[in-house]
């Protein structure tokens, strides 16, 4: 398997622009997670889906962030409008979700991340 | 307040030596604890996952321990290799559903020859 695929790998944009990050989970996995990592705050869970349904979005920082999972093989994280403080590495991860909608002890497999820079 | 603290913040050791990384948490109710290895510029890779009832789990040269009474965990690396140079992140899940993840800031390990 190719693992979790994220695109783009790098994104540079100007403040106020819309940014869309994309993720293709590992085939057969039914849980998908979006994370953000910065030097100051470390890793943070933003939102996760189980069977394409958002289970917990309490980590989404504000209304400028939205995530969708239209099918089992694709998810997007959108920031509109973007701000310089959104600059971070955004990771997508997937797991087999054997524990059901609450991921408990499932192993998560991370993608390579998208490095976002908002000028 | 749910918190995860890791120590040391950074560590330098010689190739072949052993080392131990610490993770202390104040998370309740506890669900499980994970250790991840993150190489520079890459996504984290899961090393171990331990529930309340487990006190030791190994993955090759990596051995994690958990003391749920003192709320402490350690990650022991045996016979370190240059490829062990990375950031090691401790993550604790709160509540039975495990939906709340509390992340440590990580320990940066450098293994030199």
Image: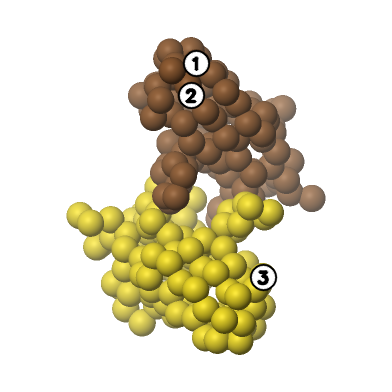
Chain colours: A yellow, B brown
Write down the quadrant of residue A30 in the picture. Answer: bottom left
Can the viewer see residue A52 in this picture?
Answer: no
Towards the viewer: B21 or B84: B84
The residue positioned 32% from the left and 78% from the top of the image is A71
Q: Residue A74 appears at what percent x and percent y?
A: 33, 74
- Placement of the N terminus of chain A among the 4 image quadrants: bottom left
What residue did someone put label 1 on?
Answer: B14
Q: Name which residue lies at 61% across and 71% down.
A: A86
Q: Which mark is residue A85?
A: 3
Taking the view exactly as shown, the residue that stands out farthest to the left is A1
Cα gap from disc 3 to disc 1, whole angstroms: 38 Å
Tell me how far mark 3 sits from mark 2, CA to CA: 33 Å
User: In the figure, B56 relative to B44: above or below?
Assistant: above
Q: Quadrant of the C terminus of chain A?
A: bottom right
| Tags 2 and 1 touching, CB below 8 Å | yes
Task: Please tell me how crowded label 3 is: few (under 14), some (14-19), or many (20+) other residues with Cα within 10 Å.
Answer: few
Q: Chain of mark 1?
A: B
Q: Are marks 3 and 1 in contact (CB under 8 Å)?
A: no
Structural distance between the alpha carbons of marks 2 and 1: 6 Å
On what subunit does the disc labeled 3 rest? A
The disc label shown at residue B111, or none: 2
Q: Position of residue B25 (x, y in %)?
A: 70, 38
**Mark 2, other Cα within 10 Å: few <14 / some 14–19 / many ≥20:** some
Question: Element type at marker 2?
Answer: strand
Element marked by disc 3: helix
Quadrant in the picture for residue A81: bottom right
From the top left corner, tell me how far across and down residue A109 is, in percent.
37, 52
Q: Is residue A11 above or below residue B23?
A: below
Q: What residue sits 61% from the left and 82% below the top?
A: A15
User: Are dots 3 and 1 on a single chain?
Assistant: no
Q: Position of residue A61 (x, y in %)?
A: 65, 72
Residue A102 falls left or right of residue A81: left
């Amino acid at each position: 398997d190719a693992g979790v695929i994220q695109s783009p790998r790098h994104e540079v944009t100007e403040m106020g622009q819309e940014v869309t990050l994309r993720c293709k989970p590992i085939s057969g996995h039914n849980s998908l997670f979006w994370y953000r990592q910065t030097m100051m705050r470390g890793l943070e869970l933003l939102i996760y889906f189980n069977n394409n349904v958002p289970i917990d979005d309490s980590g989404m920082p504000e209304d400028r962030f939205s995530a969708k999972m239209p099918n089992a093989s694709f998810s997007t994280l959108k920031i509109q409008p973007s701000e310089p403080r959104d600059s971070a590495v955004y990771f997508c991860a997937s797991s087999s979700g054997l524990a059901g909608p609450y991921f408990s002890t499932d192993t998560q497999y991370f993608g390579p991340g998208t490095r976002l820079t908002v000028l | 307040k749910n918190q995860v603290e890791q120590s040391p913040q950074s560590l330098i050791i010689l190739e072949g030596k052993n080392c131990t990384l610490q993770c202390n948490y104040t998370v309740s109710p506890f669900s499980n604890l994970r250790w991840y290895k993150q190489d520079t510029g890459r996504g984290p890779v899961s090393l171990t996952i331990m529930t309340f009832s487990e006190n030791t789990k190994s993955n090759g040269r990596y051995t994690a321990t958990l003391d749920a009474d003192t709320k402490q965990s350690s990650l022991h690396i045996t016979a370190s290799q240059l490829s062990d140079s990375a950031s090691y992140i401790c993550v604790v899940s709160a509540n039975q559903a495990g939906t709340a993840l509390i992340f440590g800031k990580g320990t940066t390990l450098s293994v030199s020859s």
